[in-house]
Image (cartoon, grey):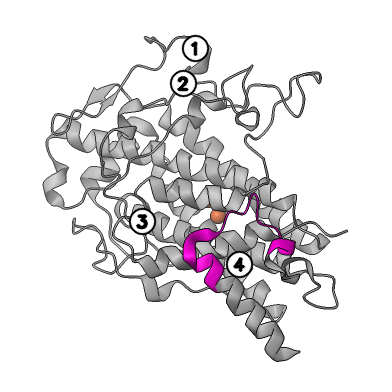
Amino acid sequence: MQIKKLRRASSRRSFLRAGLAAPAVMSAAVLGDPLPSKAFDRSGITHGDINILRFLAALEILETDLWQQYNELGGIPDSEVPGGSVSKPFQDILVNVLDMDMPQYIHDNTEDEISHFRFINRYLLSKGAKPVSLERFRGLNGSTATGAQKIKRLTNLMELTFDTSWWTRYRSRTRNPDFGDTFPAAIPGLLKGKFPAIPRSDADLNPPDHLKAIAFTAAFHFGTIEQGGSSLYPSLAQRVSNVEVLRILLSIGPTETMHFQTWQDKAGNFTPVTDPTNGLTFPDLNNGPFPPGFGVEDFQTNLIMPEPTVFLSPQLPVCSIIRPTETQGAATAAFNGLRRSGLFNGQSDAFFAEMNELAALADLAQREI
Ligand SMILES: [Fe+2]
Ligand SMILES: [Fe+2]
């Protein structure tokens, strides 16, 4: 029995490693393996619950790694979030242009992420499940700017290409990504190149508009990361079985949304600028020009609360909601989105294999009542 179980698990793993995993269509039945929905222990936690928590632990470790880099250069290194000694010119732009509380908020967001991964890992351990460690993948070089720790990283904040369409997605009153709708990016230039969100070295501290563009890239990246967490937790919660595990997802998820709301507000304080070194432009979002089919309210910088929009059915009244919350394939989609953004540029094949497997297993989880 034990041998049979092991063989099943290992054949599933090699199937996933081969890159054949397609969580949207692959069911436990196809794999001949009931593991994802089977009870993990007597408390009613399922293997699916464990797999969801393990994927979330991995993502929280990655979030912690990127937020740690932001805190070292623009936040408040202290005993709660140790490491680094701040890049004063970088932090000055965050403070003087975006908000005087930026360092405090960066610090607190970082501390929250540390608590998220530590809690989930410790909870897994308390249930007899394996916690997640990505330490063997910590091989990326980080910033050499004054203020940054000279240590190896899991994530790369120096070659980002990311999608800021969440900005218009949350301002639209008629569209919802769960209905297949698409949205224009607030800062289209961030999709066309590789941009640093932190000074890569002290050479990035000048000219002033270059450093300003780096600080604004960071500000929009903060919102990009946290809106992802805002969607991921409710998306995965729909396939959790155990009520206590559900409580964990329902309690952490909204803190991601508190972060998102804050960053959306702060990013909106940017001033239009073009980076003279690479042409990256932060346009005037309040005065346009706007893309066809979209208007001033889809870009307005002080519309930071979700506009009500279509939800579940066009027959129902519009509703102010987190979007998207489609559960099918949500873990894989979240990781692929981060991968496309360049956040893991330079990471090993083994890292991607590990993360793809964690995501695919989380996406196999089904709600068992
Ligand atoms: Fe988090
Ligand atoms: Fe987060």
Q: In this view, does 204 lie to the left or right of 290?
A: left
Which labelled disc corresponds to residue 294? 1
Q: Which of marks 4 and 1 is nearer the N terminus?
A: 4
- Rate crowding at label 4 as few (under 14), some (14 to 19) or many (20 or more) other CA atoms within 10 Å: many
Look at the numbered disc 2 and say if its residue's Cβ is closer than 8 Å to ligand 2: no
Residues shaded magenta:
14-30
Residue at mark 3: 344
Q: Where is residue 142 in the image (x, y as percent from the top left)?
A: 26, 60
Between the residue at mark 1 and the residue at mark 2, the CA separation in whole angstroms equals: 14 Å
Q: Residue 25 colored magenta?
A: yes
Indicate which disc, 1 or 2, sits on the residue closer to the N terminus. Answer: 1
Under tag 4, what secondary structure? helix
Taking the view exactly as shown, the residue that stands out farthest to the right is 369
Q: What kind of element bears circle 1?
A: loop
- Earlier sequence position, callout 3 versus callout 4: 4
The amino acid type of the residue labelled 2 equals Thr
Q: Nearer the viewer, mark 2 or mark 4?
A: 4
| Residue 147 position (above or below residue 295) | below
> Splitting the image into four quadrants, where does ligand 1 fall?
bottom right
What is the number of the mark on residue 54? 4
Dot placed on the residue nearer the N-terminal end, 2 or 4: 4
Residue 301 is tagged as 2
- Cα separation, mark 3 vs mark 1, equals 33 Å
